[in-house]
Image (cartoon, helix red, strand yellow):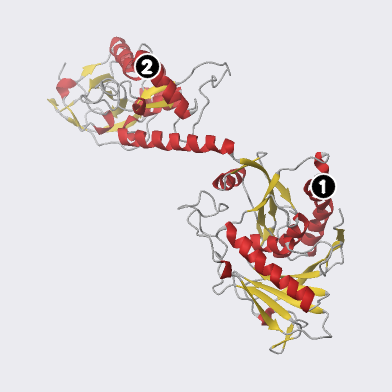
Amino acid sequence: MPDAHPFSVAGQRVVIHLQPLEDEGLDDPSLAANLRETCAAQGPVLVVANGFTTRALVGTDGKDEWHDIGHGDFGDECKTAIRPLLRARRLFWVTVSVLPTTAQAISPNQLSPATTGTITTWQKGARNLTTPKGRQAEASAATRQVVSAQAAWRCQFPGCGADLREHASTGRQGNFSYFAHIVASSPDGPRGSVRDSTRLADDPSNFLLLCDACHRLIDRISASEYPTEKLHAIRDANISEVSRLLDTLRYREVKPYAILGNLGNQVAYLSSTEVREALWNSKLRCSKDAPESLFQPGNHLYKDQTATYWGALFEKLHQEIPQVQRYISGASHNGGGRDELAIFPLHLTSILTLAGHILGDNGGIHLFQPHRDKVGGDLVTRWAWPTSATPPSPEKYKVRTLGSSSADSEEACLLVSLTFSIDPTRLPAHCYKNGEWALPALEVYVDEPSANVISHPEDLQHFGRRLDDALRTLQDQFRAKKIHLIVGAPTTAAVVVGQKMQARHHPPFICHESIGGPQAPFLPSIEISSAQVTELASGATCSLQP
């Protein structure tokens, strides 16, 4: 090579020092685009390649400075992009034994001007090392069957899951999978090993089932980002997840309902993924892809204390209560049996109480609640019941008398203090005044109220039993003809309160809401009788008769 060789400074050949790369690799089209931009600049271009992936750099004439163009898959588009460089003899090629992204120094004696033949020969070798053509015998029919079945014939790369029995663009049926070695079958291939390559060439535990794009990613685009340990972890996680998902086919089907309102001027949201994960966690599965929404006045109405909000809400009640009642009774199934129900409640407590009253205390209703700050750990979604929760003691929920019954009192109060102890000074004066109870009152409570008080499905069973005790006392002993209901409890407990109302025998319940902060007063919101629900501010009514 002449003294004017681009890898010399002041006539002296110099060693090229490279910094390790940690950025993402590029596919063939992206790397080609970068190379095309480089063709318009001056200075030499250097491609550092091992047997299956590359790194490209551009130099500055007369200076020992090199800048990365990118690294990854050098395919046919790259070969086309560098033609101007080949004609100008500005492209140089060097082969290294390590990953190009980790190469630290290039000796001038390793360098040679690249030719079309250089690139063609390299690409052929890269295909031999990274593609299954001509190498299917390395994965025997038995191994391919095991690997395919474990992956359910889908790409195992995280977030892909492509169906490998169908061509991605044409939809044609066939086998479009790549049985990708984790430890390459050749010591010179991606993650190759002199000790293990031959030994593991047909071992099912050494394979990932991948689509073409993901196969190229781990072998030729970003090989340095996917070492053996990471790919084994991907394989193990995928097999475990596929097994879990297939197991859900054995679970009982339920029909999911989302009872969502706008709380604290925020729009409630529940995704189909959250629903599926929560159901699977309880060994149930959806009978449809998305939950059906109930009693939601509209996302544009987010202020829950306004007359407009309640007006829109009652319009929804008029439409949807009859639909739910027909489904519960089986009328919508022509007298046949209905699916079990899964209820996901996140609404005002008075509306959740109403929903429970409509659903009734029948079997086949599964309640789920959002658990605050509990995503992760033993929860796959905040709506799943924590797997680490232990069944509560039957004595966890208790009933006590706060205000005594009197012969001339036709009204009474029922407090439910689970997430917090209800301060009676926050109640209306007709319930509590001047430090004394103006009405007889009972309270269902726990010794240590908290947001996580209900963390196991059996909590709802024990709470329901104590609630039954309180309601019997209010009706049989207090003989209350109207009950003022004040609830400080998780969403599922509010639904249970409504379920425990006897449809044809209970007195009207005046539900109260606290809107405006932790110390805001409780004010009457709706009245629920056996015949109808009434919005107390406007007098709007909606029938509850089937």
x and y, in percent, of residue 268 in the image: 65, 55
| Location of residue 59 (image quadrant) | top left
Classed neighbour count for the residue bearing mark 2: other residues with Cα under 10 Å, few (<14), some (14–19), many (≥20): some
Question: Is residue 221 something one can see in this rendering?
Answer: yes
Above or below, 71 relative to 119: below
Query: Looking at the picture, how far across and down is residue 359, in whole percent?
Result: 75, 55
Tag 2: residue type? Ser
Give whichever of discs 1 and 2 has the lower sequence position: 2
- Which residue is the extreme one toward the bottom? 434
Q: Is residue 543 left or right of residue 295?
A: right
Secondary structure of the residue carrying tag 2 is: loop
Q: Which residue in the protein does label 1 denote?
A: 326
Do the numbered discs 1 and 2 sit on residues whose CB atoms are within 8 Å? no
Q: Position of residue 544 (x, y in %)?
A: 85, 58
State the residue in front, 5 or 410.
Answer: 410
Q: From what the image shows, is residue 445 above or below residue 266?
A: below
Q: Quadrant of residue 132?
A: top left
- Residue at mark 1 to residue at mark 2: CA–CA distance: 57 Å
Residue 357 - label? none
Amino acid at dot 1: Arg
Q: Residue tagged by mark 2?
A: 140
Q: Is residue 513 above or below residue 179?
A: below
Identify the residue at image location x=50%, y=31%: 161
